[in-house]
Amino acid sequence: MIGMKKLHIYLLLLLGLLVSSCNDWLDVKPRTQVRNDEMYDSYKGFKDALTACYIKMNDRKLYGQQMNISAVEFLAQHWEIDYPNSMVAEVALKDFDYKDDQAKTVIKNIYGGLYNVIVQANAVLQNIRDNGQVITDDATRAVIEGEAYAIRAFCHFDVLRLFGQIPKNATIQVALPYAETVSIKAVAYYSYTDFITKIEDDLTKAETLLKDNDPIFKYTFNQLNRFESSDANKITLEDAYMGYRQFRFNYYAVKALEARFFMYIGETAKAYAAAKAVIDAKNADGTKVLTLAGTEDYNKGNFALPSECVLALNNFELEDYVNDLFAVDKLNNFTVLYMNVSKIADLFSGQQTSANNRYNFAWDMSKTDLSGVNKPVLHKYYQDPDASYSSVDLATQKQVVPLIRLSEMYLIAMETTTSLAEANTMYIDYMQARNIPAEGFKSQEDLRVEIVNEYRREFFGEGQMFFTYKRMGATTMLWRNEDVSEENYIVALPDTEYNPNL
């Protein structure tokens, strides 16, 4: 855990799966520790401190598992549970039993992990104010500061989505701590209205700092991802730390987070504008910054669709995590994650599946247990153990944990546009990228219903469905037999409250 006051900050520094400057942040492991009062004496210290934020986000307590693949997905009623006695926490989360001891441990770890990242970002921000002049390049300093604000906003937003009140017509009010310092003392709690204002303020600061300073305004994501490759036409970066922008909070990731945030709080016009800013964004050469992945990623075995990620994490332990959760030889293990055949049919109801990219590539329908029972498993994070990849391809195409994808921007724009014709055009383009023939909708309500289904299909195993239900105030969930109450959507704050060290 990160020390919060005077103690040491534990930096997660480099070992070498990747080429040297990839090690600045893409591939990091615990190696050393530096005193807090010394590490910010140089640009390298700031790089190490910011890198630590992303590594902490990769922890299995957060976006390495619980906040995308398991805990938050169980809240959305995803995954099968054959043996409840061996998956006590998961059963409790599916039942919204936040008093169960094992569920409380999972919740406490998530809560503490989020605030741990926040405090690390706050350390960067505080020292930028106090000693930022050691970063002599103004644009570089602005990028690092902008990323820290974005990380702080991102994690606080997920605190809100998980532990906060429902965003529409709430009868239960929840105050939450918004941490803006490295101290654990006297952290102020804010009402829902004040809390979302804090998030918006941080997003605005991040956007302002990254605007024009982010290397993405000069280069494409692909160029920045491959500047250390063997490509003949690769670019040269004076500062290697400014590469790999798709795997750090870049300018468009902030815009995408704004779209998600405004969508959640019901500011639909702002959500639409932010989503469209990402969809329509152009590179310096006039090409689109991002396009929907289509079949190209799938055909390359890049099942997490890295080419359409606005923001992703590189997780060098992902293969180990996936083997723990989805490995074929563990289908007879009580804790493997899978779906049954009937629920897969529910998931893709109303769509043809013969050429459906997600049905054929994002899921492996062939797996069975020892009894011959078909148990489809998620293929999104699969890496071929027999394949050989370059270090750059491994980092940027295989070890990928999506945090925000372009497809979400399409769904947000469809849901928030005032033009049904525009929504239909985007929907048809979106479905074509998934290799599914589609026609437009005759009403906004029909479109809205299908968008909910698309969130479920598109982001299964990415931790977005529970939050989609919550922002809509849904009283029912697919695969749940009982109604969902307002209380069910408010995950109980851990007994330890704010202190992530406990």
Image (cartoon, rainbow, N blue to C red):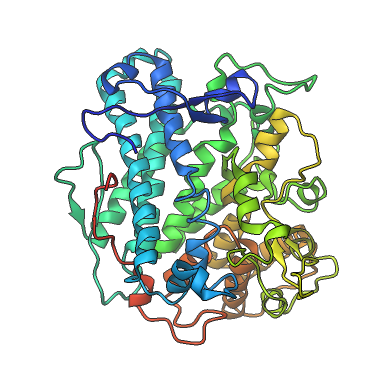
Q: Quadrant of residue 347?
A: bottom right
Q: How many numbered marks does the figure carry?
A: 0
Query: Can residue 267 be seen from the camera position used here?
Result: no
In front here: 305 or 221?
A: 305
Please state the horizontal and vertical placement of residue 380, each as a whole percent of the image: 68, 55
Q: Give above or below for 115 relative to 261.
A: above
Q: Residue furthest bottom?
A: 482
- Residue at image position (16%, 43%) is 185
Residue 380 left/right relative to 101: right
Q: Eyeballing the image, is 439 above or below 137?
A: below
> Measured along the vertical axis of the image, is residue 419 above or below residue 111?
below
Q: Quadrant of the N terminus?
A: top left
In the image: residue 172, left or right of residue 93: left
Q: Position of residue 21 (x, y in %)?
A: 58, 20
Q: Residue at x 38, y 30 (%)?
A: 145
**Which of the 4 quarters of the picture holds residue 485?**
bottom left
Q: Is residue 486 above or below residue 317?
A: below
> In the orientation shown, which residue stands out farthest toward the left?
186
Nearer the observer, 59 or 161 = 59
Residue 493 spot, x, y in % from top left: 28, 62
| Left or right of residue 335: residue 88 | left
Front residue (pair 360, 310): 360
Kindly identify the residue that appears in the image at 27 percent across and 55 percent down.
195
Can residue 483 be seen in the rendering of this structure?
Answer: yes
Q: Position of residue 225 (x, y in %)?
A: 65, 30
Q: Is residue 264 left or right of residue 427?
A: left
